[in-house]
Image (cartoon, grey):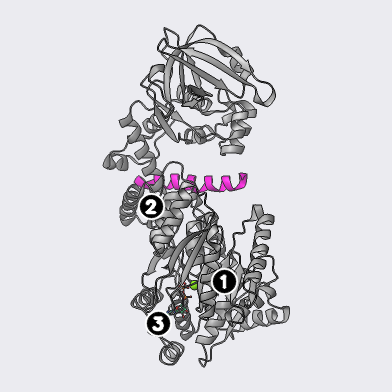
Amino acid sequence: MSDLSSQNIMYLPGVGPKKADILKKELKIVSFEDLLYYFPYKYVDRSQVYKISELNGNMPYIQIKGKIIQLQTIGTGRQQRLTAKVTDNTGYLDLIWFKGHKYIKEQINPDREYLIFGKPSLYNGQINIIHPEMDMIKSDIPPIHLGLKPFYNTTEKMKSGFINSKAIQKYQKAIFDTYIGKITESLPSYIINSQKLLLLHDSLKNIHFPENDQLLQAAQYRLKFEELFYIQLNILKLRNQRSVTIKGHQFPIVGEFTNNFYNNNLPFDLTHAQKRVIKEIRRDLGSGKQMNRLLQGDVGSGKTLVAFMVMLIASDNYYQSCLMAPTEILAIQHYKSIIKMAEGLNLKVALLTGSTKKKERDYIHSALLSGEINILIGTHALIEDIVQFKNLGLVVIDEQHRFGVEQRAKLWKKNSTPPHVLVMTATPIPRTLAMTIYGDLDVSIIDELPPGRKPIQTVHYYHNRRNNLNRFIRDELNKGRQIYVVYPLIEESEKSDFKNLMEGYEYMQRVFPDFKICMVHGKLKPSEKEEAMKLFAAKEAQIMVATTVIEVGVNVPNASVMIIESAERFGLSQLHQLRGRVGRGAEQSYCILMTSHKLAEDTRKRIDIMVQTNDGFEISEADLKFRGPGDMEGTQQSGLPFDLKISNLAKDQKILQYARNVAENILATDPLLELTDNQLLNRQLSKLSKKKLDWSMIS
Ligand code: ADP
Ligand code: MG
């Protein structure tokens, strides 16, 4: 469809420079093709015409046929509105406009019959329709949309620039009227035939102007299939390319470091799941190929230990490794626990973060180059170009969802042969999403918690039960336990959030004067944060008041109560992460979700799920359903490979699986897509990746 993708939307009849600018800014629509791929978000059946006497206030969008018998402007200033009385001889109805009166008043022709479309609502016992759509009925020409009418999402800016859903439909019509025949097929005919798909032209036509429900569904299926198919084909082809072109370091030896640790330092037995995962990883490390593996395991499942054992194997084979964490608190914690596990092993472990002093930093840089350091632990500071290794063989990335793909790629370049990469995450990702974002990674799953853990009890309290809560906290404190109290702190509303945090801190000091309370939040200097963490970890402070900076990875096993204030403001996976800070020791742990009385429907569902289950996978599936993949935590930064225009990873799991199978089958016979028959596939892939680049430059 090269023709349509190079046609500037400005030149489409009815658009022009001003509207083109709005379309570009609001929807990133630049070409005719972009517009064609801007799909309706819903369809409404307009084959039926209701009588006014049949209407009630609970109906969805409907249409009636009637005459305007009265038109008047009511009120002044902002209150001003235009009302039109309509009748169809079965009753009367008011149409109301709050905006654009003048224009509408000029357009409306009293005494003519109109097809009126909108959502009826009940106000003061009267049915009315606010901002209806009107089509004049001319006896000779039938109105353009009887049947299924598409609706397009529009923004406020678009509406004030006179681009509403109806306008978009007109533009679509202009494209089809003028450029019919220019839409060339984007899937090879052998796929179309074997999958019995609708042709691209027919699919686009029916998605915008459905002939009937059946064709609409066929069109949707075809477009979803194609979208998901190319994403899978892209990921799987990249994986093939990588395994052909990139060799991996070989780690054949299990030597002294590993054996000493296993025999002398390992404080407990590995779980079955840990053993299985280590085996899977070892197989990769001996394969001669570069490992790219995702290690998923719920909070507390013991991923750090797995990572450490893999790093020991790297050391046994004379390779260096590094472990990158998303926050300084977490990097320090990893450093400490690894130092402890490495006691007596004669292993050199270093910590590098943004606040490492210059002298130490210089030393680390040179000791990495000389090979003196075996294991480097740190934050983003690891990625800086100045950090060079003698022989980096393994990179472990903890809590991957905080890192972008580009940052991952930077670590690759730290050795002429790229290091093995192990990505760890405790935010379980639904399978479909994992296939899409990490489809090029192999996946290992730790699906078992270490023995002896008691499931965390989660309860939901309204604010008015604060006295009960305080009594409960005091009981737990008296038993020698420690408590987290977490406040939301979200950037845009930072000031008032910060005030809440401070007030919460002072409140706890007033209620629990006999205990020591420490506080951690993003505005503290790293040294201050560490000081507070230290106090808490050493049990010198019993209560920690914090923001979500403690969300990920923090491990203080004696802490057994997690109180989440204004829990309604957190997303599901964030709540689950926070809850994972407790339940790390042998004691019964609790998570208490504090909310106000008024809860929106989906907030209540979120809270209910938290109370019902501790299973991170269940929670992430629910999260995907509630919020859609675009908003899922963890995906915003790593990013979907492409914008999904029509498919929905929560709803279209079957199509995705199917599309992946088709892609796998094609690559099984033609791993790098070299056959003549497959050149269309290659062209589409490069077109998609180019598009992605263009967009990132615009936005
Ligand atoms: P996560 O997977 O969330 O990163 P961690 O690696 O922080 O979990 O481990 C959580 C806790 O479980 C740590 O205190 C760790 O020492 C402990 N742990 C790990 N593996 C085992 C095991 N096999 N048996 C008992 N405790 C374990
Ligand atoms: Mg961890």
Alpha-carbon neighbours of circle 3 within 10 Å: few (<14), some, or many (≥20)? Answer: some
Q: Give the CA separation, mark 2 to mark 3.
A: 33 Å
Q: Which residue is mark 1?
A: 414
514 and 185: which one is in front? 514
Labelled pair 2, 3 in contact (Cβ < 8 Å): no
Query: Regarding ligand 1, which quadrant of the image does it lie in?
Result: bottom left
What is the secondary structure assignment of the residue under circle 1? loop
Tell me if residue 98 comes above or below residue 574 in the rendering: above
- Amino acid, disc 2: Leu
- The quarter of the picture where residue 363 lies is bottom right
Q: How far from the left and from the top, in percent, is residue 35?
A: 51, 33
Which residue is found at the position 43% from the left and 34% from the top? 42
Q: Which mark is residue 197?
A: none
The range drawn in magenta is 677-699
In the drawing, does residue 472 fall left or right of residue 680? Answer: right
Position in image of residue 658 (x %, y %): 31, 49
Contact (CB < 8 A) between labels 2 and 1?
no
Q: Classify mark 1: residues with Cα within 10 Å, few (<14), some (14-19) or many (20+).
A: many
Q: Which residue is mark 3?
A: 252
Q: Which mark is residue 673?
A: 2
User: Tag 2's secondary structure?
Assistant: loop
Local secondary structure at mark 3 = loop
Whether residue 697 appears in magenta in the rendering, the answer is yes
Residue 322 at least partly seen: no
**Which comes before the other along the chain, label 1 or label 3?**
3
